[in-house]
């Protein structure tokens, strides 16, 4: 039997590199996972659309925890990406909410590619 397809609007990655873990990224990942579950935002929940993954280094080691989000561009034609440094739980939930609602992503603490 083939696996069931789950629709996703965005993929969030939380760095689990050594520097980010030293700044709380493991706890941030768990808290964000619980938030996505409780709010039914996780891709496998009815109405949910977000994937959350632990990742390797996202390149802002001195400013962790870091988070990256990818989602389809609103006008189509590729992916929008946003990279964030010094992410705390309130910012992570705002990023997740914007990704789910398909609204502009927060500018606060962004770095990297435009």
Image (cartoon, helix red, strand yellow):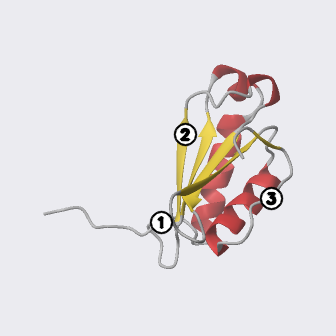
Residue at the image position 70 percent from the left and 67 percent from the top: 97
Q: Is residue 90 above or below residue 29?
A: below
User: What's the distance in space between the residues labelled 1 and 3, CA to CA?
Assistant: 19 Å
Q: Is disc 2 placed on a helix, strand or loop?
A: strand
For the residues bearing labels 3 and 2, Cβ distance under 8 angstroms: no
Mark nearer the N terminus (3 vs 2): 2
Name the one closer to the observer, 46 or 101. 101
Q: Residue 8 shows which numbered tag? A: 1
On screen, residue 49 above or below 53: below
Q: Position of residue 50 (x, y in %)?
A: 54, 62
Tag in front: 1 or 2? 1
Q: Secondary structure at mark 1?
A: loop
Q: Quadrant of residue 68?
A: top right
Q: Quadrant of the N terminus?
A: bottom left
Task: Give how far apart the Cα atoms at labels 1 and 2 are.
Answer: 17 Å
- Category of crowding for the residue at label 3, using alpha-carbon neighbours closer than 10 angstroms: few (below 14), some (14–19), many (at least 20): some
In the rendered view, tell whether residue 63 sits above or below residue 18: below
Label 1 environment density (alpha carbons within 10 Å; few <14, some 14–19, many ≥20):
some
- Quarter of the image for residue 18 reads top right
Q: Position of residue 15 (x, y in %)?
A: 63, 34
Residue 106, numbered circle: 3
- How many badges with numbers are in the image? 3
Q: Residue at x 27, y 67 (%)?
A: 4
List x then y, in percent, for residue 59: 68, 27
Q: Nearer the viewer, residue 70 or 113?
A: 113
Question: Label 2 belongs to which residue?
Answer: 54
Q: Residue furthest right?
A: 108
Query: Looking at the picture, does residue 91 appear above or below residue 26?
Result: below
């Amino acid at each position: 039997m083939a696996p069931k397809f789950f629709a996703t609007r965005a993929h969030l990655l939380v760095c689990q590199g050594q520097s980010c873990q030293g700044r709380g990224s493991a706890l941030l990942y768990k808290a964000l996972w619980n938030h996505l579950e409780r709010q039914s935002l996780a891709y496998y929940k009815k109405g949910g659309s977000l994937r959350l993954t632990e990742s390797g280094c996202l390149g802002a080691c001195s400013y962790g925890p870091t988070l990256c989000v990818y989602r389809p561009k609103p006008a189509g034609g590729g992916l929008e990406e946003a990279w964030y440094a010094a992410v705390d739980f309130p910012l992570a939930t705002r990023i997740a909410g914007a990704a789910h609602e398909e609204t502009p992503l927060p500018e606060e603490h962004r770095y990297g590619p435009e």
